[in-house]
């Protein structure tokens, strides 16, 4: 009986220990996140500097009266948001350089430049 209790105690400790390790790993792998607001066909901010060589998360908030079509053809990224909607896109690891995203519904005013350094 004592051996069974010792084994059970070991399993419980192992289970909790692995849980704590998994939590700390999950926290250390969070993506760098940048918040973008779109209003009246304009991105705020319209330029964002991000770390190169890392995956990036862009949160999008459409504060405009109409829909938004967030797009980058080179990365095959396209996200449509209704007025008042929020969402996100995850970008792949970016090489140093500039990457342009547009609002297809407002291509003249709706441009976001992501600068990877």
Image (spheres, grey):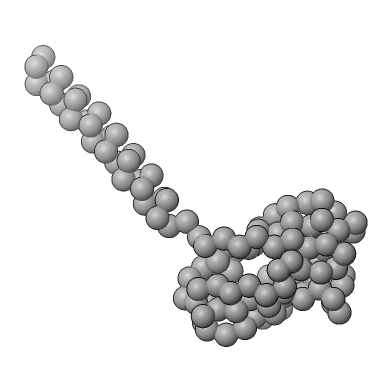
Residue displayed at 65% across by 60% down: 35
**Residue 61 appears at what percent x and percent y?**
74, 56
**Residue 72, visible in the rendered structure:** no
* Residue 42 location, quadrant: bottom right
**Residue 80 appears at what percent x and percent y?**
78, 61
**Residue 93 appears at what percent x and percent y?**
51, 73
Identity of the residue furthest to the bottom in this view: 97
- Residue 103 to residue 35: above or below: below
- Residue 69 to residue 87: above or below: below
33 relative to 69 in the view: left or right: left
**Residue 114 appears at what percent x and percent y?**
63, 76
Q: Which quadrant, please, contains the N terminus?
A: top left
**Residue 36, visible in the rendered structure:** yes
Identity of the residue furthest to the left in this view: 2
92 relative to 61 in the view: left or right: left
Q: Residue 66 versus residue 12: which sits nearer the camera?
A: 66
Q: Residue 16 versus residue 34: which sits nearer the camera?
A: 34
- Residue 42 to residue 65: above or below: below
* Residue 33 location, quadrant: bottom right
How many dots with numbers?
0
Identity of the residue furthest to the front in this view: 45
* Residue 78 location, quadrant: bottom right
Residue displayed at 85% across by 76% down: 109
95 relative to 69 in the view: left or right: left
Q: Residue 13 versus residue 114: which sits nearer the camera?
A: 114
Identity of the residue furthest to the top in this view: 1
Residue displayed at 71% across by 59% down: 60
Residue displayed at 29% across by 34% down: 16
């Amino acid at each position: 009986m004592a051996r069974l209790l010792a084994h059970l105690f070991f399993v419980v400790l192992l289970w909790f220990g692995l849980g704590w390790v998994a939590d700390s790993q999950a926290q250390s792998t969070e993506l760098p996140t940048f918040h973008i607001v779109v209003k009246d066909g304009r991105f705020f901010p319209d330029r964002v500097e991000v770390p190169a060589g890392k995956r990036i998360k862009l949160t999008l908030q459409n504060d405009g009266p109409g829909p938004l079509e967030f797009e980058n053809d080179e990365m095959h990224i396209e996200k449509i948001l209704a007025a008042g909607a929020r969402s996100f896109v995850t970008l792949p690891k970016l090489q140093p350089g500039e990457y342009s995203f547009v609002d297809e519904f407002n291509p003249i005013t709706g441009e976001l430049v992501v600068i990877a350094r």
